[in-house]
Image: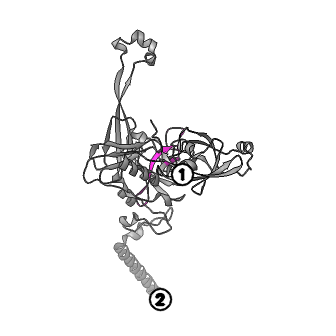
Amino acid sequence: MSIRNLLSFLIKSIITGLAAAFIIVALYPGLLKKGDTVVEVKENTRPAAASSASGLSGFAPSSYARGVGQAAPSVVNVFTTKVVTQRPHPFLDDPLMQRFFGDNPQFAPRQRLESSLGSGVIISDKGYILTNNHVIDGADEIQIALSDGRSAQAQVVGTDLETDVAVLKIEMGKLPSIVIGQSDVLQVGDVVLAIGNPYGVGQTVTHGIVSATGRNHLGINTFENFIQTDAAINPGNSGGALVNTEGELIGINTAIFSRSGGSQGIGFAIPLSLARGVMEQIIEHGRAIRGWLGVEVQAITPQLAESFGLGADAKGVIIAGVLSDSPADQAGIKPGDIVTQINDKPITEPAELLNTVAQAAPGENIKIVGLRNGSAFDLQAKVAERPTRSP
């Protein structure tokens, strides 16, 4: 091939290549815009609705919106007001100071309105609302605000100081009642959501897990069986809902353990199994009805076990006192007795005796087994109704 023919072939090849490149760029301009990628990511190509689903079994859901959407309309804000009477200076509460200054209008008692806030849960479309007793304690007026903007004045159906449960009622149609869940099947590690009105900012949802179940000995209530959770619970959340990821009610948020007043990841909720039983009794009888023996009990410490001549592995509780003419007194229980069983159920600590007796219906006979001066005893006691605790 001559040099002229070779040059002609090269020129034609170059022109053909440039023409082809021009056509490709014209048809696919994005080829020139693709630069280097800092990090490879996988884009979510699923529809938005699919992203909000609960996800596959064994994996954490990408959203709890469905459960929240089911439960949130049933959670209400509880606003209370009460009239507080106080003197301009605490010294004026002294009778001697009142003697000299009591007639002076300048030092007369003054009244002011004190308001507080909390949360509640619509438990029935008939208008019953479950909340904490401490949320509405002493209130002269209780206002309920629903998430749909409606509001109504509430009446107190009844309260129970010993579990910190209160039942309110409002008269309103088309109420969104919450779906009831099963608190007895909760396991440590289950995901839970807390819904309420913290600090009055409006309805808020926080999430966490069940940190523990059956918490007691906290000194919060007489009857304690708390669900512990690390879902953020703050002032104003009290009385609100603790729900599972399906939006089913499993507890009533009640208290926080905090050194600062804010959430530190240790919150407590009354399990629904306890709150529901109290609520049903309040609605039916106006009060919670529990069994009562009239005894004071204490745990067996190593020192007490030694003084009573018991082994180091001794089980039971010691009767420290018996109220005169109480069911325990009539049954023949005496101070110093050691109770080991009630109705064939082992008793190992004071809370177990208290709860077991409280669950018995007034008038019911219970079987008590124990030790007295080293000898076994077995007797029957007729349970009475536990006296109502005053504020």
> Upstream in the sequence, badge 2 or badge 1?
2
Give above or below for 132 relative to 181: above
Residue at x-position 45% and y-position 63%: 61
Residue at x-position 33% and y-position 13%: 105
Residue furthest to the top in view is 100
Mark 2 nearby-residue class (10 Å; few <14, some 14–19, many ≥20):
few
Give above or below for 46 relative to 80: below
Relative horizontal placement of residue 294, taking residue 288 as reference (left or right): right
The percent position of residue 329, horizontal first and vertical second, equals 57, 42
Q: Is residue 128 visible?
A: yes
Q: Name the residue under label 2.
A: 2
Q: Which mark is residue 356?
A: 1
Mark 1 nearby-residue class (10 Å; few <14, some 14–19, many ≥20):
some
Amino acid type assigned to the residue bearing label 1 in the image: Thr
Q: Is mark 2 on a helix, strand or loop?
A: loop
The percent position of residue 44, horizontal first and vertical second, equals 42, 66
In this view of the protein, which residue sits in the foreground, 65 or 73? 73
Report if residue 370 lies within the magenta region: no
Q: Quadrant of the C terminus?
A: top left
Amino acid type assigned to the residue bearing label 2 in the image: Ser
Q: Residue 187 carries which label?
A: none
Residue furthest to the left in view is 173
Report if residue 263 lies within the magenta region: yes
Residue segment shown in magenta? 245-268
The percent position of residue 375, horizontal first and vertical second, equals 70, 50
Are circles 2 and 1 on residues that touch, CB within 8 Å? no
Q: Looking at the image, what colour scheme do you see?
A: one colour
Relative horizontal placement of residue 225, taking residue 194 as reference (left or right): right
